[in-house]
Amino acid sequence: MIESILEQSKTQVDKASATVLVSDDPRMKRFIGEALLVGAILYLLQQYCSGFFKGLGLDDLGESHGKKARQFIKRIRKSKVTNEYLDPVKKDVEAAIQKARQQDATDLAVSKAESSVQETLVEAGVVRAQAVDIARGLSGIILGE
Amino acid sequence: MDESNHPLLHQWLSACRQLMLHHPRHGARTAGVQLGYREPDLQPGWNVISTRENSIHKELYTFIGEDEGVTTPIHPDVPSNTIHKVPTRLPDLSSTSLWKITKDLAQRLSEINKEPYSSKRIAGVMESIQKAARSDGTKIDIEAMKEWVHRSWATMRRALNECRYDKIPTGDFLKPALEVLRAYLSFELPGEIAREILAGILSTQRTLPCLGPPSMMPPRARLKAIEHLVDLVYQIDRQREKVKVTPYFELTYLAGLYCGAAISLAAHAGEVGGLSDGETIKVENLGFWVEEWFCHKVSLTFLLPANYTPGQTVRLLDANATHTGKPLKDVVDSYGLYPGLRSLLCPTSKFRPMSSSDVLRFYRNCADSSQSFDVLAAIENVYHPVASSNQEAIVRDLLTMTIGHRI
């Protein structure tokens, strides 16, 4: 399931946005290969799930995913990304999405999830209109709306 | 008239856009490297590139690895003698394949001599390209810039004088920015000069009443100008997906200029300062995003239509993906293909049973069923380069000056 979600998400997250996400210094421009693009998408999916659970009042679960997301992006910004490193993260994100799909997707949960993705992107430098489009696109992919 | 119905014109206009997007010799070199006529300048491992003399960073270091890479102004932690020095000299325009193709196309189009691309107009464009190519591309042609800066400044000064006669000449005052856009879109000005002049005008406009140098622009007005331009770049990208072939390429070409002007303004912001730490980071990040956007969405868009027919293009990209093992979508995305043509390759290849003339017919049909779009009219309305908050401030300043003269 996660591979299908990642493929669909590639239509939403372009290379320019992925590049700014995986760089913590605008002076270090990394070339976006497949692994880094997948890393950037996994980070956004984690952020989405974190916001979604918080919007449902499941604060601990949301915070736990938020913490994992922050640790993950810190790691991929500092070192080379390999499939071996991405595989367990994919499993983790897949489990979070499955759990999210079992919940009642309230307006507040979707709104918090999308805000979480938007703010992450805008903070990295992505123009807000695109951040909004990406967040909505991920909602459609994750929740099937 | 949409250029999809005139293959010769479409190819010539694409070649002109490729040459004038930044600097003709730069555009021709990029085409040569991308299409395999020239050796790539970068080698595996670390490379150092000397940038233009007025760039923020004098040197950029690029690492080319097997499946990763990075570009940075920071000297890498390796001995200098292991870093490959990239030659900075750009090829003479006359020696490049792209220029030879452009000249041949211009000759054939001139023989047709049909409005709106009369032989006189075509000759004018070719002359502008050659004029822009006279500078070596390592530094900005200051003389060419001065002429435009003086002209723009004189127009704004004349508009200010109108304030003495109870007029609020907002339209005239904002006109120079639109004139630069028109000159760029009609290939009178190359992108490397147009972006600097546009950034300069947008800055100077906000120094009323004195019309001072760009550095006098209030820092937050500069931030607004950058935010506005990057917003436009994204809006333009969304719009171009829906339109015919001519506006698709014109909008992409326009986005290239807005990216360049935003990058120049971001560089000014770094030099001038005056913003909070958070705002400074915001400017840096927006500058970063817009540079990446330019690389991924604009820089190679004109290359294939300048060199190949639609039928050749789909076959070339399909073969390229097979040869390199890259996903076809990635290859297609990197060349900014027109959506109709893209649909023949992604998500699955549909062109294989089609002849070249079938592909061309399909291309035209896609264009015919897409929206018409007047780019110049849109620039005056929805894609105006001056941010609304800056326009409001300009109107307020002009009004103050008018009232001041009356008193």
Image: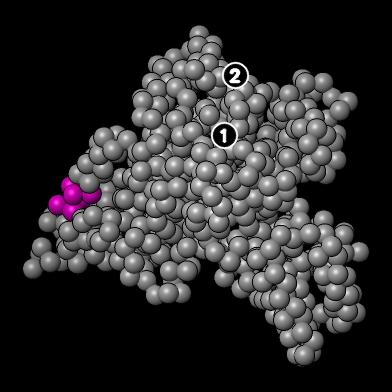
Which span is picked out in magenta?
B156-162
Q: Position of residue B130 (x, y in %)?
A: 40, 22
Which residue is tagged 2? B8
Q: Which residue is mark 1?
A: B41
Count of numbered circles in the view = 2
Residue A26: percent from the left, percent from the top? 53, 61
* Chain designation of label 1: B
Q: The disc labelled 1 sits on which kind of residue?
A: Asp
Q: Amino acid at mark 2?
A: Leu
Q: Residue at position x 77%, y 84% from top?
A: A64
Prevailing secondary structure class for the magenta stretch in the rendered image: helix
Residue A68 position by quadrant: bottom right
Quadrant hosting residue A47 = bottom right
Question: In the rendered view of the protein, which quadrant contains the C terminus of chain B?
Answer: bottom left
Residue B65 placement, left or right of B38? right
Dot 1, crowdedness within 10 Å: few (<14), some or many (≥20)? some
| Labels 1 and 2 positioned on one and the same chain | yes
**Residue at 36 percent of width and 25 percent of height:** B134
Could one spot residue B171 in this view of the protein? no
Q: Residue at x 35, y 46 (%)?
A: B54
Near mark 2 (Cα within 10 A), the count class, few <14, some 14-19 or many ≥20, is some
Residue positioned most to the top: B111
